Amino acid sequence: MFKTVLFPVDQSRESRQAAETVANLVQIHQSRLVILSVVESPTETETSDTMASPEAVAELLQNAKTLFSQQGIEPEILEREGKPAFTICDVADEVEADLIVMGCRGLGLTTEGAIESVTNRVISLSPCPVLIIP
């Protein structure tokens, strides 16, 4: 059913918690797993945070790959730069994802959070179904 699963990751607790569900789905459906890290370019007025550093991104992706490899899953790893929601949807289209699985930070519970939520934007723009893990 799900030939290709796209799993966007970041350094959040929610992303780590979603990993177990992703592993189960991939194993059940014998899916191809693509792990994606999106680094948002800091604007001129913003300062660079730790997630934007190449070392932090490399460590995040290596840890994710190791986690899945220990469960017999060999994921593909992608790193992209851009606006997270748009980039996630572009990559989903590019890799022909049948499902995007994301952790949710719960920001969508407020009006301000709903407007700014990457998760909500991905749901609106995605070329395939999106599974949100609370």
Image (cartoon, rainbow, N blue to C red):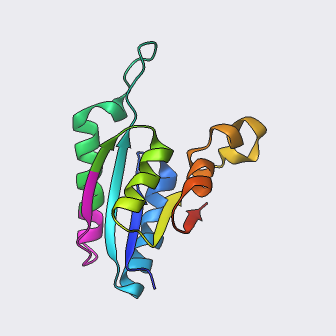
Q: Position of residue 74 (x, y in %)?
A: 22, 72
Q: Residue 117 lies in what quarter of the image?
A: top right
Q: Position of residue 130 (x, y in %)?
A: 55, 65
Above-or-below relation of 19 to 24: above
Q: Is residue 77 magenta?
A: yes
Q: Residue 40 lies in what quarter of the image?
A: top left
Above-or-below relation of 133 to 29: above
Q: Nearer the viewer, residue 43 or 60?
A: 43
Measuring 55% from the left and 69% from the top, which residue is drawn there?
Answer: 129
Q: Is residue 25 magenta?
A: no
Above-or-below relation of 134 to 113: below
Looking at the rendering, in which quadrant would you find the C terminus? bottom right
Q: Is residue 117 left or right of residue 99?
A: right
Whether residue 104 appears in this view of the structure is no
User: Where does the magenta region start and end?
Assistant: 66-78
Measuring 58% from the left and 62% from the top, which residue is drawn there?
Answer: 132
Q: Nearer the viewer, residue 124 or 19?
A: 124
Measuring 63% from the left and 37% from the top, which residue is drawn there?
Answer: 116
Q: Position of residue 99 (x, y in %)?
A: 48, 70
Q: Is residue 106 left or right of residue 15?
A: right
